Amino acid sequence: MSNKKKTFLNGALILAIAGLICKVIGAIYKIPLRNFIGEEAMGIYTTVYPIYTFLLIFSTSGIPTAISKLVAQERSKGNHKGAHKVFLTSLKMLILVGGFTSFLMLAGSTLIADVLKVYSWQPVAAIAFSLLFVSLLSAYRGYYQGMQNMMPTAITQLVEQIIKLFAGFFFAIRWIKYGPQISAAGALLGITISELIAFVTIFLMYHKDKKKILTFSDNTDKTQNFAKSLLAIAVPMTIGGAVKPLVDIIDSVMVKTILENTFHYPIEYINALYGFLKNDCGTLINMPSVLTVALSMALVPAISEALTNNDNKTEVKRISATGIKLSFVIGLPCTVGLFTLAKEILSLLYVYVTKDHGGFLFTAQAKLETTGIFMMILALGILFLSIIQTTAGILQGMGKVIIPVVNLGIGMIVKIVMNLVLIPIPALNIFAVPIGTVTCYGIAALLDLIFVIKCTKTKLNFTEILRPLGASVLMACSIYLMKYILNAPLILGGSISKIITAFIILIAAVVYFIGICIFSVFDESDLKFMPGGKKIEKVLKKVGVKIRPSVQ
């Protein structure tokens, strides 16, 4: 393997590991935070956050990628001074973009809060300046990535998550006595502080490396308009990246407006419902993405390498088929587990208490029942989400970056229409929202699969998909059997119930592993592709599990 390829793969591995750690920290962070500050404050948090992510797209979606690409291009030509000029040009651009979006969010905090039905400017203002810090951070990250040095990006990602964890908790809990809006503002302020410290970290790294960097910047500088080149790459990616956060904002405003105007629910009750849906369920539904995102990261370079290796279409087909099958291996048991143990898992992780929300008494048991239905519906979307992330990796590896974005956009348009039609129906009410979400993911997954099959000429082997399905059905049967034998009542917050739930989850995981062995889910090709596949193969063979030959 060439040094260049080793450098790329090592860099990808560093980012993948850092990304996985950050996702785990981020997912774990939200569970205790929600238990401490309550569902209403968390509902406000999850309402304001999409505005931040939408504005963040303009400074982080396309520009860092454009920076790294142009820096790499200039360095490959020996024009190190030009590479550094790309960085300086992008830094100036991002100062303007970040400064403008921060000002926009801060100046419009009251208006934004009213539109989002938060009715408090503090949560919006608390996160405003983070846009500037992230913009500056993106310029430095893009420059280092263009130089094939992924460590600064990985370190600052970890700094972000750790500081957000401690600062967010500190201010959210300290300010909880002032009400849910101020408590949510404290949690959001933790994000701003984390981005500031991450920026300072990478700024110090750059100045430590500056002398070394500039010694390689004495080549002839071709006076080139890098700003134009940066925008040419960044603008299309930014437009694509803005789709999901924009729809999240529309979804939030639409859902709250319809519930308030049609059913005349108090806004405090609506914010609590929204917190259950987006945070309690959303956090758990997105946890399997830790694995599928890692799979997607592995697929991009694998597909790209196969295409550049004498246009090896057979290898592309093999990798694509393996990736799709692994998305089922990951998605199916997660769907089954969260569907069959929805209320039990929610009761295990979250605290539900009876509380008056704007004159509407919401009992602890009613909260659990409502959130449990949300979870059961959304669990069906986990498999679709796994397919989306996996197929996106395949398509990105083939250079077809826009296709997954367009497909997701189509699904989200359908979701918006479904919200308008279904939420006003009394029998559906708020439950129409997760139904729309699952439909959105289902449409996007189907379209992505169609394009993958069309672009790679891969034929889906349904026998290979039935194998993990059989293991998942076996797991589901074991869960229902254990629930019947143990006859475990769902004791809200009871320690016995939590112990029983944890025991069932453990046994279910063991049964799924046994099912994988019984149905011979993995073949030699799958294990070669998986991280640590050789070690897994050795372990399986030691315990007497036969590994099937690769499926062609």
Image (tube, rainbow, N blue to C red):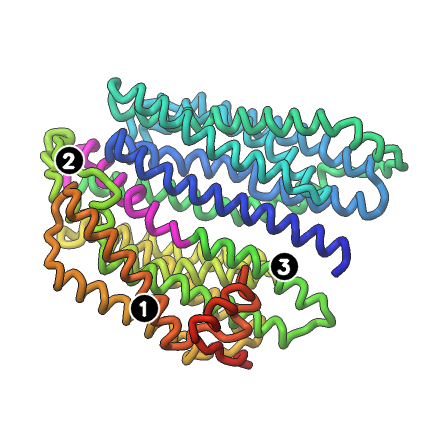
Q: Is residue 100 above or below residue 512?
A: above
Q: Which residue is mark 1?
A: 472
Under tag 1, what secondary structure?
helix
Q: Residue at x 25, y 59 (%)?
A: 339
Of marks 2 and 1, the one in the foreground: 1
Image quadrant assignment for residue 315: bottom right
Identify which amino acid the numbered label 1 is placed on: Ser
Query: Could you tell me which secondary element the residue under label 3 belongs to?
Result: helix
Residue 353 badge: 2
Crowding near the residue tagged with mark 1, few <14, some 14–19, many ≥20 C-alpha atoms within 10 Å: many
SS category of the residue bearing label 2: loop
Q: Disc 3 to disc 1, how far (Cα)? A: 30 Å
In percent of the image, x 34 and y 63: which residue is there? 333
Q: Is residue 121 left or right of residue 374?
A: right
2 or 1: tag closer to the N-terminus:
2
Residue 325 position in % (x across, y down): 46, 70
Residue 253 position in % (x across, y down): 31, 39
Amino acid marked by disc 3: Pro
Residue 424 in view, yes or no: no
Q: Is 114 part of what is drawn in magenta? A: no
399 relative to 420 in the view: left or right: right
Mark 2 or mark 3: name the one nearer the start of the chain: 3
Majority secondary structure in the magenta region: helix
Work out whether residue 339 can be spotted.
yes
Quick one: label 3, few (<14), some, or many (20+) residues within 10 Å?
Answer: some
